[in-house]
C-alpha cells in the first residue's frame, strides 16, 4: 500500500471575491469554463487556473481580469493536484454561475463555491496529489433565533434580490 502524506492548503480568497474549486478531466477545461463564466453575467470578473494531470502537466489559465487570473493561478499552484481547477471571481456570486460550471462537460466534481476562508485537504502519494475534501468557513456557533431568521432574510433580499 502506498504511503499517503497529508497537507492542508490555505486558499487565498480576498474579501471581495468568491471562488469555486473542482475537479475536471480534459485539457479543454480552461476554455470551456471561460465560456461558461463569461456568458453568465456582463459584470463578472474572473480567472481560471486548471492543473493538467497528463501530457505537459501545465497549469492552464483563462479569464477576463488579470488580477483574478493571477489569483486563480496562484491558488492552483498551491493546490498542485491533477485535473483540478480554481476559479476566482468578483462582481458575481457562485449561485449565479454554479449550474453553468457544473454543466461544463469536463467538470467531474465541485468541492467548494464560497467567499469564506477555505482550506483544501490534499492527499499526496508517489504518483501525485489529489483533493480529498475542503474546509469551508467555520463550525456553527449555535442555532439561529427568530431575530437571526429575520436578519438572514433581509440580507438575502438586499444582496441577491430574494423575496419572501
Image (spheres, rainbow, N blue to C red):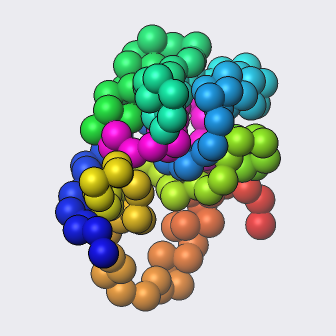
Question: Residue at 25% across / 49% down in the picture?
Answer: 10
Q: Name the quarter where the C terminus is drawn.
A: bottom right
Whether residue 48 is visible, yes or no, is yes
- Whole-percent x, y for residue 5 in the image: 21, 63
| Quarter of the rendering containing residue 39 | top right
Observer-nearest of 142 and 100: 100
Q: Nearer the viewer, residue 47 or 24?
A: 24
Can residue 113 be seen here? The reply is: no
Residue nearest the observer in this picture, 18 or 129 = 129
Residue 80 part of the magenta-drawn span: yes
Image spot of residue 57 (x, y percent): 44, 29
Identified at 53% across, 84% down, the residue is 146
Residue appearing at x 72%, y 49% in the figure: 102
**Magenta-drawn segment:** 79-95
Expressed as whole percent of the image width and height from the top left, the position of residue 56 reads 47, 23
Up-down: is 11 above or below 133? above
The N terminus sits in image quarter: bottom left
Task: Judge by depth and name the residue closer to the eye, 37 or 155.
Answer: 37
**Residue at figure coordinates x 36%, y 86% from the top left:** 142
Q: Is residue 95 left or right of residue 128?
A: right
Where does the image place residue 120, in percent across and percent down from the top left? 34, 56
In the drawing, does residue 103 fall left or right of residue 95? right
The image quarter containing residue 156 is bottom right
Amino acid at each position: 500500500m502506498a504511503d499517503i502524506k497529508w497537507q492542508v492548503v490555505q486558499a487565498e480568497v480576498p474579501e471581495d471575491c468568491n471562488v469555486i474549486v473542482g475537479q475536471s478531466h480534459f485539457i479543454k477545461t480552461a476554455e470551456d469554463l471561460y465560456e461558461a463564466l463569461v456568458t453568465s453575467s456582463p459584470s463578472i470578473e474572473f480567472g481560471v487556473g486548471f492543473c493538467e494531470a497528463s501530457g505537459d502537466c501545465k497549469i492552464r489559465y483563462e479569464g477576463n481580469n488579470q488580477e483574478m487570473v493571477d489569483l486563480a493561478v496562484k491558488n492552483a499552484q498551491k493546490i498542485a493536484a491533477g485535473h483540478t481547477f480554481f476559479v476566482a471571481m468578483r462582481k458575481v456570486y457562485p449561485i449565479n454561475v454554479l449550474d453553468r460550471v457544473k454543466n461544463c462537460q469536463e467538470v467531474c466534481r465541485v468541492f467548494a463555491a464560497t467567499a469564506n476562508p477555505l482550506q483544501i485537504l490534499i492527499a499526496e502519494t508517489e504518483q501525485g496529489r489529489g483533493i480529498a475534501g475542503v474546509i469551508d468557513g467555520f463550525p456553527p456557533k449555535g442555532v439561529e433565533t427568530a431575530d437571526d431568521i429575520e436578519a438572514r432574510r433581509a440580507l438575502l433580499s438586499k444582496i441577491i434580490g430574494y423575496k419572501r
